[in-house]
Image: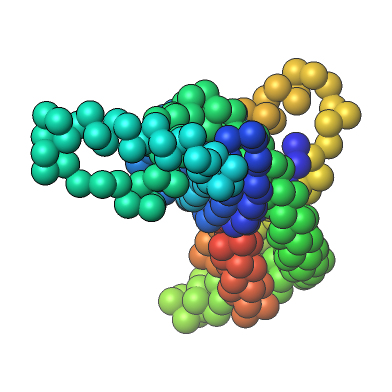
Amino acid sequence: MTIRSMTAYGTARAEGPDGFVTLEVRSVNSRYLDINFRLPDELRVVETHLREQIARTLSRGKVEIRLSYSRQRTDPMDKLDHEYVKKVAEQLRLARQVLPDTGAPSLTDLIKGASGQDTEETAPDFWVTLAQQALHQALSDMQANREREGTRLATMLLECADQINEIVESVGHVLPQLLDEHRQKLTGKLRETLENANPNGFTNISGEELTARIAQESALFSLRIDVAEELTRLQSHLTELRELLAGDESEAPANNARRNKGSTGKRLDFLFQEMNREANTLGSKAAGISVTRAAIDLKLLIEQMREQAQNIE
């Protein structure tokens, strides 16, 4: 699966015996495929054909198509000869027999008549074929630009992923120490509370009972601040992110079919939502300032990734 940006530009020109067309295609990010045309009224016949062609190539993006054309004009002096002018004069004489006020044609009218511009019509299929050829070339040009930009975006996302992985690993390394420190603090507070409530209480409580009670409270508190599960899920999301960006097609066919459902951009957006949820949980369960800072840094990096992924098809 190739990573492509939704922002790009392409242009092309196609020529034929009766004229030529020039086509420009621009694309910016959008949740869905949104196609808009700017065509001369004479070429509205090509819109449906081009729309179908674009839908087969692109899956997302706001796409604008600009199309202009020009007819092939023959040299009028090749046809504006003596015989032609004599025929026009004879027709004018006949017309004045019925309509005496009929005016003589201007030189421009004679030239147009000589070149056949008033009588010859180019078949619609001619313009459809030229427009499709130009669109094919323009889309190829644009897709190459989209892939280059997509490679740059993927590199930026992987750099952010590496930073997230460093943060996750650093929290994982200090987590056992943080849990142990909090157990010790909790044990001290429990002893202090019992002594303040009943100075002679320890004489009525066995050491085993006290130790068991303190261990129970410490275990409950440790569960509330243990973020190992969140760290594991974050690392799992990072693995999924790298696989999406790598576009590895060497996997099993069934797995490929699963991955190819939907656009990469939408899959990334969902993935970053899940990562952000884990970062929020990490912050809410933070047992120390270092974990709080780590959660903030994670949220910032995830937001940067999400913003970049908005432009991926």
Determine whether, in the image, residue 137 is placed left or right of residue 79. right
| Above or below, comparing residue 159 to residue 260 in the picture | below
Q: Residue furthest right?
A: 250
Q: Position of residue 271 (x, y in %)?
A: 60, 47
Q: Quadrant of the N terminus?
A: top right
Q: Position of residue 128 (x, y in %)?
A: 53, 29
In terms of depth relative to the viewer, which is nearer, 84 or 57? 84
The residue at the point 53 percent across, 41 percent down is 81
- Give the residue displayed 11% in from the left and 43% down from the top: 101
Q: Is residue 242 above or below residue 279?
A: above
Q: Is residue 291 visible?
A: no
- Number of numbered discs present? 0
Taking depth in this image into account, of 184 and 263 the one nearest to the observer is: 263
x, y percent for residue 209: 62, 56
* Residue at the image position 61 percent from the left and 67 percent from the top: 304
Q: Residue 135's quadrant in the figure? A: top right
Q: Residue at x 75, y 24 (%)?
A: 255
Could you tell me residue 273's position as x and y percent? 54, 51
For the residue pair 102 and 211, the one nearer the viewer reads as 102
The colour mode here is: rainbow
Is residue 192 shown above or below 265?
below
In-front residue for pair 180/111: 111
Residue 294 seen in the current view: yes
Q: Residue furthest top?
A: 254
